[in-house]
């Protein structure tokens, strides 16, 4: 297995550059000269001819001519050759020389350029044109392809020459999201094969588990791992020929075996030789074993009383496939097989629910308020949303400006839960993308539990994108580390007891006994009560901060002592969007951690 990165130092005076790269890339430096920290070799070409198969990357530091002559004798195949990058002796340029895409030389050149502050000189056409590297997509996103090298090269040629290309997306995953987000002008997206105008298309790129019949133009298939196979069989079923039989049946039903994500069965079949053979045959597949209790509530289209008597479930193959697919779509109902006397088996195939195209709800943490403090993913979700439903009184409207033209943007401030659900479901049922935008991080007083219960009840697809919380914004605004070595090692996020009762063990005066840094949400209206409880444990002189609309344009921060907290809040008419911070960590500059005080003290010496 290729693991080593070798730095071949041709220019001795560039040793300092080589050592920087050695440290950053965990590499070994080789040179023909005896230099400190270098392994001496008799010749660069001889070293490469002997060790090329052990190397994942080679970095030449020196003249391009020497680099080219040195690698000439060991160039074999771009799919197996190591990545080779040449760096000039002054560290100004990093140039991929061999295995740009497949071997990773282009990416390595960019990494080296970042380390040295150099320029990566990329000559690959797709990179320079801002096009996808089609040969890298399987590696980047865990897809497979049945295309030969020649077929792949033909597709790449058509693609980089900007021939009309159809992108067929039958599923949705991280990779397809990226493709849609970075769509080149000559590519058009289709979600149904029958919509593709084949007469006007020079290439089809299909991310799909399905097989289509197209003979007029090249089709580049990418097979994501999205199919789950459930298997039932007689005891000690002979596995010979079964995998090939299943693959033939799948292909006849337009399903590619390369898209298999898992194979599984019921617990009583876990030691069957057939399962082991199938698991090994379908490389990268997971082996899923379920108890009868885990499968008994799954409804199958082809129930069998006989199977139930033996296994405790009405259909092993179908129930296992559906269980592994998270109750997705059964794309191949139970198939019966008998390749030899007494060796009965059944199998079924289901499509993973998480990749099925349709409506989706993304619960997004908007951050504390500043539109630039939303996560990159959160911003991306807003940009693709068909509906943005945001918490109007808590989220600045500026955050919704990321929404695409034509998106519906609504505030939930005047809606009850039923109205919010009805609006989201209306868009969801149309197969559209919805962002529910919450302040801060949704898990902290985000009121998402009721929404998720609704989504679960109706089997709706949803996901949570976390956000920066106001307590983190408070620490930044106060220029404070909320933990002090050997004094304060905990941060408590809580609220005072208003209309919502607090559990007895979580009342403020009990939490305050820890003397931790305390961040108190939603409590400005009951600040007198908060102050009274905190004074039962904290000294009156404990530093406090009342933080109003953190990171908003209207941000205000008032510092003081705990004994004056209520007066500070009342004097400045602070309202709901106020976070109260209490603890001696505020503005603390004492107590360096042991790490910096001892092990790294030399870093601070002049």
Image (cartoon, rainbow, N blue to C red):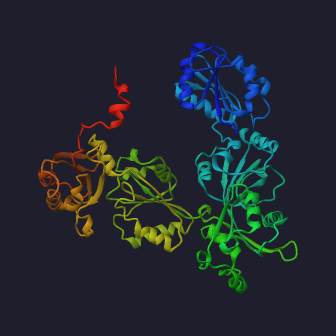
Q: Residue at x 78, y 23 (%)?
A: 72
Q: Residue at x 40, y 51 (%)?
A: 399
Image mark count: 0
Q: Is residue 48 left or right of residue 569?
A: right
Q: Where 475 falls versus 168 (above or below)?
A: above
Q: Position of residue 298 (x, y in %)?
A: 61, 77
Residue 327 visible within the image: yes
Residue 18 appears in which quarter of the rendering? top right
Query: Where is the N terminus found, in terms of image quarters?
Result: top right
Q: Position of residue 400 (x, y in %)?
A: 42, 53
Q: Is residue 576 left or right of residue 217?
A: left
Q: Position of residue 423 (x, y in %)?
A: 45, 68
Q: Nearer the viewer, residue 97 or 394?
A: 97
Q: Nearer the viewer, residue 470 or 129?
A: 470
Q: Position of residue 448 (x, y in %)?
A: 40, 65
Q: Residue at x 44, y 48 (%)?
A: 375
Residue 37 appears in which quarter of the rendering? top right
């Amino acid at each position: 297995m290729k693991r080593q990165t070798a730095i071949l130092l041709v220019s001795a005076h560039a040793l300092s550059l080589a050592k920087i790269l050695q440290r950053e890339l965990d590499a070994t430096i080789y040179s023909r000269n005896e230099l400190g920290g270098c392994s001496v070799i008799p010749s660069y070409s001889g070293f490469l001819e002997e060790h090329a198969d052990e190397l994942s990357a080679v970095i030449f530091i020196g003249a391009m001519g020497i680099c080219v002559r040195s690698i000439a004798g060991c160039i074999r195949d771009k799919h197996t050759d190591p990545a080779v990058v040449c760096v000039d002796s002054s560290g100004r340029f990093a140039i991929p020389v061999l295995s740009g895409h497949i071997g990773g030389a282009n990416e390595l050149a960019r990494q080296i350029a970042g380390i040295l502050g150099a320029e990566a000189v990329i000559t690959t056409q797709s990179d320079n044109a801002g096009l996808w590297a089609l040969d890298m997509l399987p590696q980047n996103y865990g897809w497979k392809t049945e295309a030969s090298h020649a077929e792949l090269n033909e597709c790449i040629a058509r693609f980089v020459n900007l021939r009309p290309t159809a992108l067929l997306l039958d599923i949705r995953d991280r990779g397809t999201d990226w493709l849609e987000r970075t769509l080149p002008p000559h590519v058009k997206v289709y979600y149904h094969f029958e919509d593709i105008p084949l007469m006007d298309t020079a290439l089809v790129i299909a991310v799909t588990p399905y097989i289509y019949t197209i003979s007029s133009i090249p089709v580049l298939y990418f097979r994501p791992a999205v199919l789950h196979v459930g298997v039932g069989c007689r005891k000690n079923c002979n596995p010979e020929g079964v995998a090939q039989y299943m693959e033939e049946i799948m292909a006849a039903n337009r399903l590619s075996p390369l898209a298999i994500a898992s194979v599984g069965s019921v617990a009583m079949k876990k030691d069957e030789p057939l399962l082991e053979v199938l698991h090994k045959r379908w490389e990268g597949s997971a082996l899923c074993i379920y108890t009868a209790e885990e499968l008994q509530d799954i409804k199958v289209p082809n129930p069998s009383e006989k199977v139930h008597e033996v296994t405790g479930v009405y259909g092993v193959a179908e129930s296992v496939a559906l269980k592994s697919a998270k109750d997705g779509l059964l794309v191949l109902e139970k198939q019966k097989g008998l390749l030899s006397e007494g060796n009965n088996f059944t199998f079924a195939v289901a499509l993973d629910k998480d990749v099925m195209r349709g409506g989706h709800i993304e619960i997004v943490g908007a951050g504390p308020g500043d539109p630039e403090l939303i996560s990159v993913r959160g911003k991306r979700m807003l940009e693709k949303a068909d509906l943005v439903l945001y918490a109007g009184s808590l989220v600045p409207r500026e955050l919704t400006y990321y929404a695409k033209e034509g998106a519906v943007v609504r505030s939930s401030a005047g809606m009850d839960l039923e109205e919010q659900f009805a609006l989201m479901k209306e868009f969801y049922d149309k197969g559209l993308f919805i962002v529910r935008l919450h302040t801060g991080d949704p898990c902290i007083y985000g009121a998402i539990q009721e929404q998720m219960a609704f989504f679960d009840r109706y089997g709706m697809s949803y996901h949570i994108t976390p956000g920066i919380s106001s307590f983190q914004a408070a620490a930044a605004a106060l220029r404070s580390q909320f933990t002090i070595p050997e004094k304060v090692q905990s941060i408590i996020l809580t609220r005072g007891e208003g209309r919502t009762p607090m559990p007895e063990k979580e009342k403020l005066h009990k939490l305050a006994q820890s003397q931790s840094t305390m961040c108190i949400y939603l409590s400005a209206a009951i600040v007198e009560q908060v102050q009274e409880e905190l004074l039962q444990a904290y000294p009156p002189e404990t530093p406090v901060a009342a933080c109003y609309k953190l990171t908003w344009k209207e941000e205000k921060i008032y510092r003081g002592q705990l004994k004056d907290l209520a007066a500070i809040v009342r004097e400045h008419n602070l309202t709901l969007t106020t976070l109260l911070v209490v603890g001696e960590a505020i503005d603390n500059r004492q107590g360096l951690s042991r790490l910096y005080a001892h092990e790294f003290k030399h870093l601070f010496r002049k």
